[in-house]
Amino acid sequence: MKYDFNSIEKKWQKFWQDNKTYHADLTGIDKKLYCLVMFLYPSADRLHIGHWYNFGPTDTWARFKLMNGFDVFEPMGYDAFGLPAENYAIKTGVHPQDSTDRNINDIREQLKTMGAMYDFDHEVDTSKPEYYKWTQWVFLQLYKKGLAYRANAPVNWCPKDQTVLANEQVIDGICERCGTPVIRKSMTQWFFKITAYADQLLDGLDRIDWPERTRLMQRNWIGRSEGVEIEFELVATGEMEERTEVRGQRQDARIRVFTTRPDTLFGATYMVLAPEHPLVQSITTDELKSKVNEYVEFVAHENEIERTSTTKEKTGVPTGAFAINPINGEKIPVWIADYVLATYGTGAVMAVPAHDERDFEFATKYNLPIRIVVQPKDGRLTEPLDAAFVDEGIGMSSGKFTGLESKKVWEGITSELEKLGTGRRKVNYRIRDWLLSRQRYWGAPIPIVHCNSCGEVPVPEKELPVLLPYDVEFKPTGESPLARSESFVNVKCARCGKPAKRDVDTMDTFVDSSWYFLRYLTPHLDNAPFDADLVSKWLPVDKYVGGAEHATMHLLYARFIIKALKDAGYLNFDEPFQSLVHQGTITNQGAKMSKSRGNVVNPDQFVQKYGADTFRMFLMFMGPYNEGGDWSDKGITGVFRFLNRVHDLFQSETGDRREGTANKIADLNKVEQEIYRKLNQMIKKVTEDTEDFRFNTAIAGMMEFVNFYEDVLSKANAERSSDVPAGMIEQVKVVNEHDRVRNDLRNLVLKNLNILLAPFAPHLAEELNEMRGGLPSIFKRERWAKYDPEAIAEESATIVVQVNGKIRSKITVPVDSDDDHVRQLATSEDNVKKYLEGKNIVRAVVVKNRLVNFVVK
RNA sequence: GCCGAGAUGGCGGAACUGGUAGACGCACUGGACUCAAAAUCCAGCGAGGCUUAACCCCUCGUGCGGGUUCGAUUCCCGCUCUCGGCACCA
């Protein structure tokens, strides 16, 4: 008979709602625990397996902590701005606000069927003015600190979505959202100066409990590198001299490069500027002008994929100009080439083909000289090289630095340059400033007004929010949709009162999600973004659970915004997420589930067929939580059967419910002692595994115990009723099975099993608790089970007997038996004797409670 | 190309600091119950061999090749493949 999960789950969901069981009392707490999942990005879809996989197990963990005496805050909300809603609107004509509201209402109902501890009074919705008012406030705080600025920059432009994308949203030159190749465009855009926090963002990584690979990804993304900026004088040709004199800007006639390998400076045989480098026009000689212009034009038309492809052959042209190597006065040619990026360092490099792979490739192609200035410590390079030698070694052909180790050469040349005033130590970062403006409708408007007389004027805080107008034509044209809303655009300048125009861009949704966890505490507070007092009590987040795909986006942005707000004096902590866990990805037939692939699996069918408890528990049982895996519903019946067996076990308990002295091991008979021991072993295992998000083995532990326990009960009974015909055992069992095991021990077993199961199958656990005569809610009434360390120890141990490392026998001895005694016993085993006969025992390894290994010859 | 993670039965996966490989579950096979099926329960279940009446017993086996060790899924060296990240960052 299957348990009626349907009515049980409905019953307890109603109970929880009616009794506000999960109402969060945020004040008067003594052991706070902020358990957060990455909030929902509500597209037009309903909840999918991925949401369940993220939320269900996390809720199990939160309930586990709650039962362990923590004051747990586990909120849920909606990252409701963004492209999916807007694209949906463009396709169907349904306004994003309407579709978003409707979706959220649907999703909320679905969330309730999951059986999580969300307090829906604490929801946030980033698309509501009461929320984005404060997103705008966050922008203004950064603006005040000089961390938000507008600049003209080459940006990633998606021709399909008709908007600018952040670097992180461009994957292999393709728009992350729609798959269209991205093009480069020069536009005036808003940036957050995240680069100013590069070092702090790096340092903070050492203080937080995050997966190593995520911290590594952030480190690589920030890409700090220490090197030297070196100036190369240009050789004054006749025409150039004329130019520089006319402009009186002789200091401009230098090329600055950044290098991490000043130790190879003697090997610099040419220089390369990015085609976009500002000096290109002024240094190019007349005869090469047309070639250079042609090339610059050619590069400008390469798209992002072509430009950044590492497999593509490098191209370039000479400018006709020459520069002077400051360390040896050598005259070397200046080229421009597409392998040098305008956006990193100074946009120019010194080329050392012998010791840099890219330079080597380029020099080989264009027949530029290759000079060895570093020799490996062992072996010797001979010309011509067939590959660049990029490792450290011993300097050669490097003047007075010849013969020194690379590190010494590095220091020596750097000091020399510093003395000459042509070089200085410098740190460069790979990370770029955060481009946050979007030419789209469905986002938080940027609270800036452009005034002809005053320039950029921030909207005064008391005038927030800058409301997003409802009635706007949002079909994409490349211009911000808000630009076409007269009533929105035209305002009076807050400073001078003259007519001015609002900024028409909206913010990247990653701004919305960079501070939402502060707002959860007081989602409706209207005179401040958050309650400083509560925030200082509850933050940082103790456990944050979400996908690893946010490693270099959301997780980095949020850290930056929190650091900036701290420096602005609003927060007293600077790392928002103390501990981070990534759930794995659930794929389908090896591919990520997505609507476009048409391989999305709908969780509802499983909830209908097996119930929410079974479904969420199955997701946890599938495998290690942080590994995810390919979806298969094979095996869900195993979990369902387990819950049914547990239910039946509780149902068959009709006897006395009192608890007694069953926890005194001395009072128990042999069988009872075994039960008591296994019970405590289970408690230990489930406790430790659940704490560490090892849900799969925790569940296996419960299953193992129930298997054992049912077995003991039915065996005890079978012995008793051995005179009963075989077919009758089932019926007799129901009547007699408990007679052998003390009643109070059985109660103890059920009580503990009930508690351990509760975080995993919350609905069923409430029901079982009620069946046992307990008062609801079990989550409020019961504390987590404690195991008795004394009871865990086994009485006997199975010792493996090996001869030359091969298992020949097993013996059972009391725990901690004397080594000599065990060795004696082992030698007397028949199958062991066989292998010892006629041989010399060279050595006998005895590992207590584990094995004996005889080494014989 | 670089960085990181991984590879264990038919399948998902267990295995503490080196010490019984395959926990738990699925699938499968046989049996019980049933008119029958489903459900449930019991038993078996890495490959091969020897006995085969059965218990035993033996050999091989954790991606591939080496090594360290009394003993290696676990540690070291060299490969192959899969997944994730980065991708001319000077």
Image (tube, coloured by chain):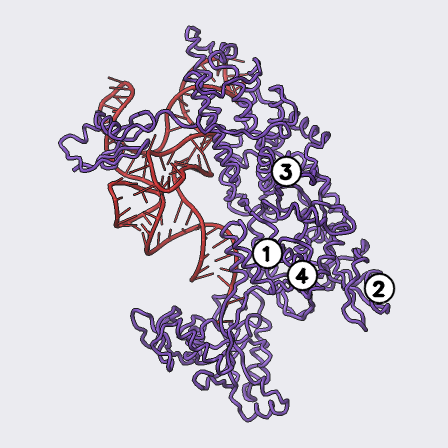
Chain colours: A purple, B red
Chain for disc number 4 = A
Q: Nearer the viewer, residue A815 or A170?
A: A815
> CA separation, marks 2 and 3?
48 Å
For the residue carrying disc 3, how many other residues have a C-alpha within 10 Å: few (<14), some (14-19), or many (20+)? many
Q: Secondary structure at mark 2?
A: strand
The one nearer the camera, A769 or A57, is A769
Tell me the number on the disc at residue A556: 1
| Chain name for mark 3 | A
The residue lying at 28 percent from left, 29 percent from top is: A818
Question: Mark 1 or mark 3: which comes first in sequence?
Answer: 3
Q: Secondary structure at mark 3?
A: strand
Q: Amino acid at mark 3?
A: Asp
Q: Regarding mark 4 in the picture, which secondary structure is present there? A: loop
User: Residue A76: x, y in percent?
Assistant: 67, 42
Amino acid marked by disc 4: Leu
The residue indicated by pointer 2 is: A491
Residue A404 drawn above or below residue A205: below
- Compared with A851, A660 (above or below) is above
Label 1 neighbour load within 10 Å: few <14, some 14-19, many 20+: some
Q: Residue sitting at 62 percent across and 68 percent down?
A: A184
Which x, y percent locates residue A217?
52, 56
Viewport quadrant of the N terminus of chain A = top right
Amino acid under label 2?
Val
Tell me where residue A720 sits by quadrant: top left
Q: Are marks 1 and 2 on the same chain?
A: yes
Position of residue A662 in the picture relative to residue A119 (left or right) = left
**Which residue was labeled with disc 3?**
A71
Q: Is residue A18 left or right of residue A683?
A: right
Residue A188 on image: x %, y %: 69, 69
Earlier residue among tags 1 and 2: 2
